[in-house]
Image (cartoon, helix red, strand yellow):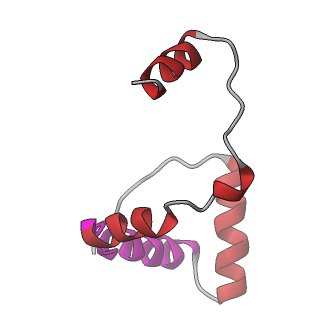
Amino acid sequence: MRRTNIYLDEDQTAALDTIARAAGVSRAELVRRLVDRGVSAAPSDLDADLAAITESFGALVADGPLERGPDERAAHLDRVSRL
């Protein structure tokens, strides 16, 4: 194992200490576990992401169109929607 120093603010330190105490481990062990979880997480799966987008299509149809304010972006979107 290699020693590594990091700077945490008071809130981060307090949160880590609370979680570590509840888990019955040291702050260092908790940080190691969190790092392991973060670096071993599977990279985003493009097919799964695209499937989620496809499945969400039409989810807000019942809400009707969103209101647009009078700004340049809204004017551009209005022009594009008429093409």
Please tell me how many numbered marks the rendered image carries.
0
Image coordinates of residue 43 in percent, x first then y, are 28, 68
Side (left or right) of 10 relative to 41 = right
Q: Residue at x 55, y 60 (%)?
A: 58
Q: Residue at x 70, y 81 (%)?
A: 21
Is 9 part of what is drawn in magenta?
Answer: no
Q: Residue at x 64, y 56 (%)?
A: 60
Comparing 2 with 59, the one in front is 59
Q: Residue at x 73, y 72 (%)?
A: 18
Comparing 7 with 78, the one in front is 78
Image coordinates of residue 42 in percent, x first then y, are 30, 75
Which residues, given as a range, are shown in magenta? 27-46
Comparing 67 with 45, the one in front is 67
Q: Main secondary structure of the magenta part?
A: helix
Side (left or right) of 12 relative to 36 = right
Q: Quadrant of residue 68?
A: top right
Image coordinates of residue 14 in percent, x first then y, are 72, 61
Q: In the rendered image, which quarter contains the N terminus?
A: bottom left
Does 72 sit above or below residue 31?
above
